[in-house]
Structures are given as structure tokens and as C-alpha cells.
Image (tube, coloured by chain):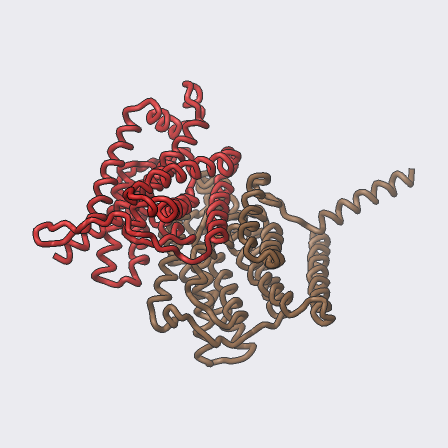
Amino acid sequence: MPRDKKLIYLINTGLVLILFALLTVFEASGVFTRYSMSIVRLVCINVILATSLNVTVGNLGQITLGHAGFMSIGAYTAALFAKTEVITGQGGYYIGMILAGICAGIFGIAIGIPVLRLKGDYLAIVTLAFGEIIRVLIEYFDFTGGAQGINGIPRMQNFSVMFFVAVICVTLMYSVMTSRHGRAILAIREDEIAAQSSGINITYYKTFAFTLSAFFAGVAGAMYAHNIGTIGASFFNYNKSFDILVMVVLGGMGSFTGAVISATVLTVVPETLRQFNEYRMIVYSLLLIMVMLFRPEGLLGRKEFHITKVVDKLRNKFGKQSIEGGN
Amino acid sequence: MNFLLQLLNGLQIGSIYALIALGYTMVYGIALLINFAHGEVIMIGAYTAVFTIQLFLANTNLPYILAVIPTVIICTLIGMLIERLAYKPLRNSPRISNLITAIGVSLFLQNLMMKLFGAQSRSVPSILNAEPLNFFGAKISFTTLVTIVVTTILTILLQLFIKKTKYGKAMTATSEDYGAAALVGISVDKTLTMTFAIGSALAGVASILWVSSYPQAGPMMGSMLGIKAFTAAVVGGIGLIPGAVLGGLVLGIVEALTKAFISSKLSDAIVFGLLILVLLIKPSGLLGEDRKEKV
């Protein structure tokens, strides 16, 4: 119903604005230190990474282990573009980000078309191989700065910009995934042969989802490069890909809210564990194993959390009461 | 001559890859799980070797190669422990949760060892220090020969074990169908544990061979080694013993030749490129059979 849909959009926009206002107030009043704000910015980047991988792993149902490769392409594109200083400042940041996405997307098409014929663990290992090849090549060539990487990328650490870019990215991906295209992709996840026999072009939609995922990984990479100022290829190794995959699986594959929540939790938790310093990674890996042992389908499974469902429930409850009251 | 030496070098690395790939391929064949923690078993094996030599063998007159006994025992126990604690409870869960658990176990072991023994690599005393052999004027190191011979013997023994013994046949049956295997009286649990044990024991041998040619033991050493060995298993055709060996040798030779004649920086890219090429041409690996998907 259009009226309801309008309401949903209104509520969601309102909630996002409230969250933004809260974070801004925290920042301004000093509740969040500079350090906390740097974690919040990292959360923005990781949310894009997790939701973008969720498109391939959760919605398309294909396990890929090379997401960091696309992120690195985005990061290097943005860094090299910023270094040319054709367009500087805010405008350059946005254009660099879009260029990063496009570049990563082109690689997504080029890798996706041959690779997506494979399935399951074969696809996983081949994407891992591609991720590693990208890393080795970046280290090999000179224009990417070799093993030293690129230094002195203009910093862009404006929290509000990063927050809204993350919101826009997630919204775009979510709306594509709930559209006609998205339903075709879900159909492929459920049963490839059945989807094919009902006229869905498998190759097209698989490549589409893969490219979409790569595009946003590139955008996140660009944000990362501008946030940190220095990038090196070794950061984008398979362990980074594993990190992103863990966020998706822990949140529940196929659930955007799950991916957002677990990206947030998995960025914040290791930072808060910093007081245990050397035990940090041990505790983190144990937590990971525990969650998988006790909740193998991830925190949210495939469910999405809709605020409107809560509203509906409340409305039903009160609606019933008023009827009962009327009697 | 240089070419032949590099070829031999490749055969040596390839033999080690093959031994590790055997562990991957057996576990994958039976449990359909990429056991990312397998590389960490090798790392623990290397540490065991270091400590056995430093704390015990160095004070006696015994040859250092005896370190292989505790190493294999510890590796076998660790492999069985991992299977029991982390993978067994997840047997009926989605495959991806198994994968994430494997990644978790691997991270855990890496960081545990880093906490216990530091992030620095430890140097390993040379284990097989015999004179290089003269072979038509070329010097071939003793380690190279031992590595190749040990791998050949172990592979043949493993193949015989799987084809000829009751336990080996139970493994094949279990990898075909859990339910049917249980129906004919095979204990699926025991068979799985045994598979992990054999794979990890081979990893123990591999770790000794690895540190005798690359005398360093560090907490991160198993990670890339494991991934390359898994790549080898996939190149050869996963689930197949001869496939793992062929894949390991091919990978080792390609890597050695690339390092010697093209670029040492690019060797990883070319190894992984080989994997992609093989899978695109023959999606089930060099020796694998193509299975058509049925509706």
C-alpha cells in the first residue's frame, strides 16, 4: 500500500537522522573522544563492505573469498586519482569514490563472467586466488607504489559525509535487492535450475550481483584510502576478505540488517578488547567459533529487522484493546 | 643444468605441498570442509620440532631427525582435537558455518602460538645435515632427496591403506554417503576422526621436511603454505589421492621455475593463475571426473 510505504520511508529516514544527530551530539559534547570517532568512521566503511559482500554471499548464495581484492582496486583507484590532483577537495573525493566503484565493478565483470560458472568451494578458492593475484600485481607494478604503497593521500575524515555515504550505499543495495532484479537473484540462490527454467538469465544476474558487490567494495576501499591516508597492498590480503566474510555470516547471510549490525559489533568489539591487548585476537577467534557452534545460521538468519513490523505489532495490540474496550 | 636443478628444487617443494594437500583432500573428500586450520597444524608441528631439538635432542647424542616422532604425535592429537571440538558439533549445519569455524580455529591457533612463543620466527637447527650427493657432476642436497623419497613412500602407503584395508574402505564408503555407510555398520564418527588423524600425521611429517629446508618456525608460517597446498589439491582434483600428489608437484615445479626464471615477486600470482586456468578449462581439476548436475 502506497500510504504504508510512505510511512516506512518516513520512519526509516527519521531513525537514520536521529542516529546521526545522536552521534553528532556525542562528538560535539566530547562523550565520544577522537579515538571513538575514528572507530565510528571505521564502522561506516565496514558496514558498506559487509552489506556489499552480503549481496554475493547472502543474496546470490555464492561464497567468495576475494572481496578485499575489489576493495584494494577501489582504494588504489581513489588514491591514484587524488594524487593526480585534477579535481581536489570535496568534489574530488566524490568523483574518486565513483571512479573507484566503476573500476572495481569493471574488474567484477571481468572476473565474474568466467569464474561464476564454478560453484561452492571451487568458486571460493578461485576468488581467493584472484584476490591474491590482484595483491601481488599491485605490489609488483611501480605506478601503484610497489610494496611501499601510496602515502600522503589527502585525508577525508568528515564523519557526516562518511555516515551519509554509508547510508546511501546500503539503501541502494537494499532497494536493488528488493526489486525485480533482486528477486531474480534470490531465485537463483534458492534453486538455480528452477530459476533457469522459469526464464531467468542465470549468467546475467549472477554477474550483475557480483559486479554490484564489487562496485560497493570499491567505494568502501576509496573511503578507506581517504580515511587512513596511507595504503599498502599487504593490508588487502585474504585475511581481510575473511574478516568481511565473517561479518556477513555472523550477521546472518542474506540479511542486510544482520550485516549492518554485525559489521558494527565486529568493528567495535575488537577495539574494546584492546585493554586485553595480546589476548584480543584469541578472544575474538574464540567468540567466532562459539557463535558458529551455538548459532550456525548467524545472529539474524535470513530475517530482516523492520521497524514498521514493530509498529504494526504495537498497532495491532492497541487496536485490539480499543475494540475490546468498545465492547 | 640450472634448469634441471630448479626442476629438482620444484619437485622438493612440490613433494611437501603434496603431503599437505593429501590432508586437505582427504578431509574435503569425506567432510566437504576446507580445513583452513590444516596449515596451523603444520605450524604447531614446526614448533614441536624446534622445542624437541632445543630442549631434549640437543643435550643428547641422538640424531635430530628423531624429532619427527613427537611432531607426528602432537600433530595427530591436535588434528583429532580440532575435529572433535570444532567440527563435529557442526556436522549438520550449513557448509558456510563450517568454513567460518575453520577460519576461526585457524585464527585462534595462530594467535595462541603468537601469545605463547612471540611473533618472532624461531630458527630451526639443521635436521638433515649430510653431505650433498654428487650426481653426474651436479650437487644435490640430501634434504631434497629425502623429501622426495619420503613423500613417494607415504603416498604409496596411503593409497594401499585406502584401497586394501577395512578402515580405508570405510573411509571411501563414508565419503560416498554418510547414511549408507552407517547402515552397513561403519562408525561415521570414528572414520571422520581417523581421517583427520591421518591427514594431520602427514602434516607432521610435512612440517619436519619443511623446516629442514626452510629452517624457520613462526606463528604465521602455516597460513600461506596451507592455502597453496589446498590450491594444489584443487588443481589435481579434490578428493583424490593421486590428484593431490600431481597437483602438489605441478604447483611446486611451476613455483620453482617462476622464481628462478621469471620473477620471484610474481611467483604467487602465477601459481594462483595456474589454479584459475585449470579450473576454467576443467572445473573438477586435472584428474577429477566431471559430474553432471541432475534435476
Q: In the image, residue B145 lies at what x, y percent?
A: 20, 45
The answer to whether residue B235 of the structure is visible from this angle is no
Q: Colour of chain A?
A: brown
Residue A168 vs residue A89, the one in the foreground: A89
Q: Residue furthest left?
A: B136
Residue A189 vs residue B137, the one in the foreground: B137
Q: In the image, residue A132 lies at what x, y percent?
A: 38, 57
In the image, residue A289 sits, relative to residue A179, either above or below, namely: above
The answer to whether residue A158 of the structure is visible from this angle is yes
Residue B259 vs residue A171, the one in the foreground: B259
Q: Is residue B245 left or right of residue A62?
A: left
Residue B80 vs residue B130, the one in the foreground: B130
Q: Colour of chain B?
A: red
In the image, residue A19 sits, relative to residue B19, either above or below, namely: below
Residue shown at the point (73%, 68%) measured from the top left = A25
Residue shown at the point (8%, 51%) measured from the top left = B136
